Image: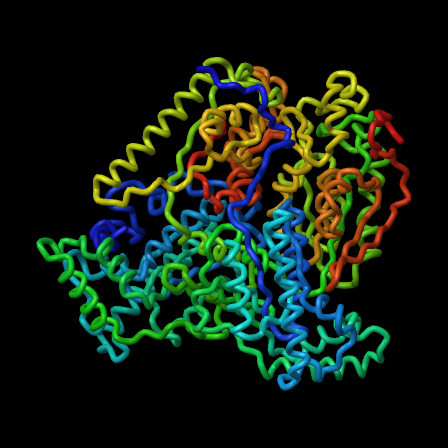
Amino acid sequence: MDTLLTADVAARNPRERRRSSTYVDAIHDMPENGELAPAQLYSTESGRLFHSGRIVIVTVGLPARGKTHLSVALARYLRWLGVKTQVFHLGDYRRAHVGPGKDVPEDYFHVDASPASVLMRQKILKKCRDDIYFFLNNEKGQVAIYDAVNPLAAGRRSLAKEFSKHDAQTLFIESACDDEKIIEENVRSVKISSPDYIGWDEKDAVKHYLARMRAKIPHFETMEEPDLNYIKMINAGERITVNNCTFGYLSHRIVFYLLNLHIKSRHTYFARAGTSSEEDSYKADANLSEQGAEYARKMGETLLAHRDKERQAMIHRGGPDVPLKPLTVWTSTRRRTVETSQYLYEKGYRVRQRSQMSQLNPGVCEKKSEKRIRMEYPDEVAKHEQDPYHHRYPRAEVSDDLSGCNRWADGLMGWLSRIMISQSA
Amino acid sequence: MSVDLSHIKTNGIGVPQVEDTRICVVMVGLPARGKSLIAGKVVRYLAWLSIHAKTFNVGSYRRADTPSPTADFFSKGNKEGEKMRQAAAEAAVSDMLRWFRKDKGIVAVLDATNSSKARRRWVAERCREQDIHTIYVESKCDNEEIIMANILEVKTTSPDYKGQDPEAAALDFRNRIKNYENVYETIDEDEKDLTYVKLIDVGSQVIINQIQDYLQSRVVYYLMNLHIRPRSIWLSRHGESEFNLDGRIGGDALLSERGELYARKLPELVASSVKDGQKLTIWTSTLKRTIATARFLAASSKGYDKLEWKALDELDSGVCDGLTYQEIADQYPEDFKARDDDKYNYRYRGGESYRDVVIRLEPIIMELERSENIIIVTHQAVLRCIYAYYMNVPQEQSPWMEVPLHTLIKLTPRAYGTEEQRFKANIPAVSTFRSKGSTAKHQ
């Protein structure tokens, strides 16, 4: 997620939009079919959630406060909720403008910058904002995330004004930090991996980077504007201030997401249920087959062996010799998932049934061959072929229902669990 | 080694769902800041989700000894009053801790002003002894209008002022608030190690500090969705369906002739209960019968927006879908009986229980709390669950409630409890209500 690595990629890209440089991360590389939001709560003509309106999320914060990480995480979450979201990293536009290997003038971020620097700033901003408007107006975008430092209150006010002229609400998210340790850790993990610091001692590199940033951006005002909508995250979520954000569904969901973002690290393992005795029927809710039961035992054994190996490895690396964090098993309420968890249950692990985790209900298509479905529901088949993701066979569930507000979103937040046994969807 | 699977149940009975943490929600704030309202809603919401929750109101403990105190009782210099108030807090907290121990409580709400830092520390210490997390919820409001409205609406009906002149009561109450203001300390930097939520001027600013776990974040999310703007929720079942006529459950049938009449009449019925200019949003399920029922309302000149929610679909009756109760009793006699024994928890084979429906409705409730005027056209079981949330109906009762067809229900949330009105369309329909043990097609 290093912003420096992608500068040349952005430079080559006609519209400056970032492609992830090292791997496909599904956030910067939009799917070929741009109309296809991953999972919508419900669909509307405009392709937007109508009770949310158009929103520009504007990040605020000094470098190394996790703004980029935050914007990418938010974009991933919002897209998964079915909201068409795109991130615009101003840094990419800046780097693309000056060209590879070069930097903006020293006074670029200063309040009393030279006319040439101000002009350059305006040019870069304009390009980025034009892309944002293009996304909102012509690509059915609903949320644009504008990732930049935005250090001054006056600048933020005029931003909000400008976006409202374009019929979009503005939500600022400030990432603030008064814990030097967190900042240094951030610098270490994302900032000093750039070519500039090859061969440097880590500590010196961190110091140098922070000093350079302090000189580069000497003025920064934390958000206190009572009239703006803002969320201020302090120390990666230790404290969150939400100001004036009563305007909608999405801002509340975002806050809820941020509240859960920092909660302790954990592993989550996924496993499918064993095969059942009546594999092709949803309604039957059948027991595990013999083969399925055998799988359940082996899967349990494998998991426990893996966890033990992890623990040994941790001790080997000099970690403390303590028991692993407790393992909780989540299953759906369908019989074969519960039965698949049985081995672990007998070993003393806690098993919880969560109805949100059930397989997609096939509705009227249950137990029917494709040929028969085509014969009986020709209209539905035609609709399905046009929009396989959102189309719903009569009474059936679609992937939307899983990831949209309806079933998963809330359950997912509370992942205390470490293994989830589910059926295929 | 083979695994013994014989005792596994997926019908929801006998599956312990233990929460990971227990929390005490400690209310903080001057009188007339809506603390009791918030406390009541949180408990109702959690109880609806089967999370064992209870309010402990310090005022009611104090009232046992001092039923109608004057404002002077609450002044800083009144040693006797201070002592008695401390005793009331002691009693409430002791009872609360006993409830956690004996009744396996999960979330307690300590409803009091808890206005000093010392008092808040004391509560945290008492809870920590029993490994109970505390989360402080401060309602801070300096908006005179809101405070005055609160005083008039709620406090003049308070048990402390029973039988007194309302004007004198309001005046005395203002003086009581002044006495509290003298000792009131808002939550600040000194308490940054505590988990807290500070709601300023009814949510225009919210500060959230040190949230530790999922249950806490859920409570916070719920609090953030609450608002106090006046609003109503209209509930209606779909019009009578062809399946209703046959006494069949589930399915995706179309409306009967009489159901069609109801659909045509619905706009008029709604209009009679809506104030001029009030904007409604229509929510339906994804099934044909609710969409058909709402279609004239959606097409009316009022320009109401409409949403179809999968979460509002009828309880899935699995293998019993499309059967009559008689057929279920014949084909699945054990299931038929099991369902009567515990209708809330019974899960149809390959289908859902009422408990499952509540879980999938939770986001709907959250969205309802956040929204203003909504009309929901849905199904019997779903409507029972939503109704149970607003009217605080216990789980043993809610699956057996009678919700007739062709009737519009209007719910208006008030400070304490919800007001209900019913509007009948006067279009005959079969009764789909089934009493315990009965297999009758129509009662």
Give residue A187's position: percent from left, percent from top: 23, 59
Horizontally, residue A389 falls left or right of residue B331, namely left
Residue A115 in the image: above or below residue A289: below
The image's colour scheme reads rainbow
Instruction: Tell which of A342 and B402 is nearer to you.
Output: A342
Horizontally, residue A419 falls left or right of residue B58, namely left
Give residue B290's position: percent from left, percent from top: 73, 39
Residue B131 in the image: above or below residue A268: below
Residue at 73% across, 33% down: B342
Quarter of the figure that contains the C terminus of chain B: top right
Residue at 31% across, 52% down: A17
Give residue A54's position: percent from left, percent from top: 50, 57
Residue at 66% across, 58% down: B55
Horizontally, residue B337 falls left or right of residue A395, namely right
Residue at 23% across, 71% down: A214
Quarter of the figure that contains the N terminus of chain B: top left
Residue A124 in the image: above or below residue B83: above
Give residue B401's position: percent from left, percent from top: 80, 41
Quadrant position of residue A407: top right
Quadrant position of residue B353: top right
Q: Is residue B371 visible?
A: no
Instruction: Tell which of B437 and B411 is nearer to you.
Output: B437
Q: Is residue A325 visible?
A: yes
Horizontally, residue B303 falls left or right of residue A212, namely right
Instruction: Tell which of A111 and A299 is nearer to you.
Output: A299
Point out the residue furthest to the left here: A199
